Amino acid sequence: MENTPDFAKLIEHLQGEEYAVTEPVPGVLHIKGRFSNPERIALRAAAEAGDVALAVWATSHHDDWALVAWDRPELVTITQKGATPQRWRHRRPPATLRPDAQTFLEGASSPFDIVTRPKHQPTDAAREILARFGITDPPPPGWVPPVVEAPTVPDVRETKVPAAGAKPARAPRATKPKPPAKPVAAEPVIAICPTCFMALPATGICDNCG
């Protein structure tokens, strides 16, 4: 990467496709535009450079991005869509294939893939290819990861589900209203003789004491 090639014609061609193109790092292009598949755009741009080493970022209007590092025979592709994890792929295509070969544009696996376990994970070899272009972090300059909101957890108390085979609860029976209570007559007050403590007659004069 000591002698950085001139990509003026390539940049002019991409701008003719109505893409915004910058060269944030010598030998590294950044393409922005209205496209749905950034990986295809970056692979085609790398292919236009021929066998000249080139790295290309492509960022869509949805803020999805791809990074292609091409230094024959090494082809490293990194893609990220939304908040999903980065997807790495390292290939070594033969001299008869360019980065824009149909199998690469379709994102399909090929006999030239360096397989990792688990799949699509970064390797030291792939990172070394990026380092040739001075790239230590795959996301394009100025890219900010999208904010992912945590899903709301429903209140289980409000969403109880009956167990399988359980009978639905019966509605409570309507109860008849009770009749109003009958009024209770007040008991008569009986006058008592203060001397003999006998009940006084209606006259109020004690029969015993006169």
Image (cartoon, rainbow, N blue to C red):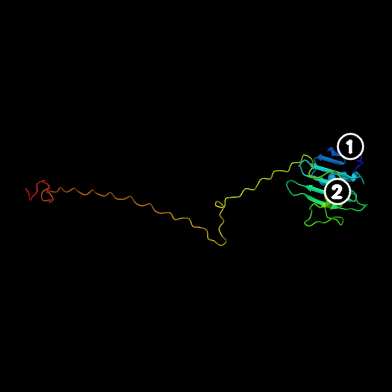
Q: Amino acid at mark 2?
A: Ile
Q: Image quadrant of residue 9?
A: top right
Count the numbered circles shown: 2
The residue under label 1 is which amino acid type?
A: Glu
Q: Where is mark 1, residue-wise?
A: 12
Separation of residues labelled 2 and 1 (CA atoms): 26 Å
Locate residue 148: give its quadrant.
Answer: top right
**Residue 40 x %, y %:** 84, 46
- In screen coordinates, is 139 left or right of 181? right
Q: Quadrant of residue 62?
A: top right
Residue that badge 2 annotates: 129
Measured as percent of width and height from the top left, residue 143 is found at 76, 41
Residue found at x 84% / y 46%: 131
Q: Which secondary structure lies at badge 2?
A: helix
- The structure residue drawn at horizontal position 79% and vertical position 48%, both measured from the top left corner, is 79
Tell me where residue 171 appears, x and y as whole percent.
48, 55
**Numbered circle sitting on residue 82:** none
Q: Which one is in front, 170 or 147?
A: 147
Which residue occupies the foreground of this view, 84 or 140? 140
At 86% from the left edge and 41% from the top edge, which residue is drawn?
Answer: 28
Relative to the observer, which residue lies in front, 159 or 54? Answer: 54
Quadrant position of the N terminus in the picture: top right
- Ranked by sequence position, the earlier of labels 2 and 1 is 1
Give residue 16's position: percent from left, percent from top.
Answer: 87, 37
